[in-house]
Amino acid sequence: MPWIDDILKRLAAETAWSYRAGGTLAAEPLSLAALALAGHGHIADSRRACQRLASLANADGSVGPKLGEPAPGWPTGLAVLAWTALANKTPDPFADFSKRGVAWLLASSGETSPRNADIGHDSSLRGWPWVQGTHSWIEPTAINVLALKATGRNEHPRTREAVRLLIDRLLPEGGCNYGNTTVFGQALRPHLEPSGLALAALTGEGDASGRIERTIAYLEQTLNRETTSLSLAYGLIGLAAHDRTPRVAEAWLESAAGRGGREAAPYKQALLALAALKGECPLIALSRTLVGSDGCQQRRSPGTHS
Amino acid sequence: MTTHIPAAPHSADSPPTLDRRALLVGGGAVVAGLGGYQLLKPLWQPHSSVFIAKGQRYDGPIEQTILDGLLAGGLDPRALAGRKVLLKVNLVEPTRTAPQVTTHPAMVLATAEVFRRWGAQVVVGEASGHMRDTEMALVESGMTPALDSAGLEFVDLNYEDVAWVKNAGRASKLDGFYLPRPVMEADLIVSMPKLKTHHWVGLTVSLKNMYGVLPGIKYGWPKNVLHHAGIPQTVFDINASLPKTIAVVDGIVGMEGDGPIMGSPKKLGLIVVGTNLAAVDATCARIIGLDPARVNYLQLSADRIGPIAEGRIAQRGEDWRQVASPFVLLDRPELQRLRLAPGVCVS
């Protein structure tokens, strides 16, 4: 599709993968660009992006948000995903970066606290925070679940606990926000972007509570042609993770790709290109190749990329 | 840290005489950049003025109201020519089904027009606290068409490059703050909050609104670093560390009950303007039936950010007692204890 080719060309030509056009290099858009390029088979370009990503890695294995900003390390999981996606396509020159990144993830966690009647979620569950020393929230936890699954750690206790956390943080009526469900007995509102990302991380997971299914329904009912690029892309990735891609997805994505201004940022363009891959989007495909549709374990041993 | 300048209290019946000239000193320093800020701090006035306008509507002549309020507060239009003004709106978690959550676009357009008329370079900015998709926040708040119609630039403070500044307040354990470059480069930051209750700290107005200058890439979504360091302490610390701020409060429709996100709309018809955020927030607290001296971050701010005592805040425009309308608070003892003592006379 021409619009995807245009995006991939722009991503390949970038020197400062950034949150906005003309912005400075940032680890998240860089990781997403590397994933998009790898997912669409542009291996050499993805390798170049991964190399740049490696230059942002700290000695302890973490990756900070921007060049010159080594902390906090919440982009580390995204970097691990990018390096792992490339490793699936080519001899792995970044195995050591990925190994140290995973070690950093496993050594870090969000702060927990005893359950509090004022707060709806189970605050004793461990996931990941945005910033060390604070509570676990939906998006860093979802990113790191994807990273651990992609590196063969689907059954790791941290992955399993984080999956429980994600399901616990889904709103009873479906969807999620940044990570609170109820406060003082009042249910909060869902938002598309974190809901899509959480669903991506919950690919292949069972849920007796029905919250995953209701989150799928929320996305199906709420996404539309006008949805902003970030939310549209993550929403569609989340639906693809559960084989529920809407038939009009490609048209919506193409429409979003044609937007200018703030929506034309490399960050958002990379996500649109990723969403266009549907079930082959490496964010979810890496997990899916590890857990077969029949539920059998088909993944590499946990040490493969360690 | 600011220097506390003791001053004799004034009664509400005889507000301190604040001639325009005295405030022009503050106004001039406000727009003098970081160097000017250092000069401004020791010049902190023991008294401040707050302008209140009633009967306001989003489709009414609010540009004139805001202009009147800024002039009443002593801002010197001549000093703003060519200066960078950042309108810091509240887009913490916008949704079109609950417009009482966020600053109304009409307020932003009107304020921008006032500063543009004075020759300032105006941008609008926010680091949305709960939403990573800033474009969604702009769409849901109705801000996108407003910004586009006026040709106003929006700066996404969540993702901008940052600089570190020392914590000048030191009420919390934080050594300093990462501030986005547009905040550092602004000659004047206009806090443009919605007047809302807040289920943790009582109310959120212009001081608490400044949580939204801190970037998500460094503080997260939500900015949990600040919660862990103490909300009252960090509200004070951020404001003590920020240069050159004033406030234009959207109190036309506020939020009561379970604010700052899930509360109900409360029609007040008010616009509140002032050059000192502590004085503005203390006045807003009184308007909604809270005792500012019982609000923790206002206690911390008193006489350091600015005055909160009624006798040291000169009322311009309407008297707060004439427009007061107590807001519903959640039925929690820590919130109910913030109410003004019985017997405080409001009309």
Image (spheres, coloured by chain):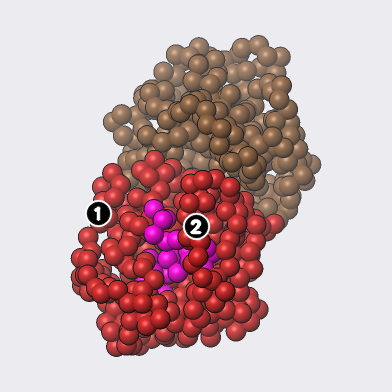
Chain colours: A brown, B red
Q: CA distance from mark 2 to mark 1?
A: 34 Å
According to the image, label 1 marks what residue? B166
According to the image, label 2 marks what residue? B339
Seen as rendered, the residue at the extreme right is A247
Q: Position of residue B331 (x, y in %)?
A: 58, 47
Residue A15: tell me if it is visible: no
Main SS of the magenta part reads helix
Amino acid on which disc 1 is placed: Lys
Q: Residue at x 71, y 21 (%)?
A: A208
Residue B336 is inside the magenta segment = no
Against A302, residue B65 (above or below) is below
Relative to B302, A240 lies left or right? right
Q: Residue at x 35, y 50 (%)?
A: B233
- For residue B257, the mark is none
Q: Position of residue B12 (x, y in %)?
A: 40, 77
Against B197, residue B319 (above or below) is below
For label 1, the crowd category at 10 Å Cα-Cα, with few meaning under 14, some 14 to 19 and many 20 or more, is some
Q: Nearer the viewer, mark 2 or mark 1?
A: 2
B33 or B1: which is nearer to us? B1
Amino acid on which disc 2 is placed: Arg
Relative to B114, B187 lies left or right? left
Q: Residue at x 65, y 22 (%)?
A: A205
Q: Residue at x 29, y 78 (%)?
A: B26
A103 or B281: which is nearer to us? B281
Residue A167: tell me if it is visible: yes
Relative to A212, B182 lies left or right? left
Magenta-highlighted residues = B274-296
Q: Secondary structure at mark 1?
A: strand
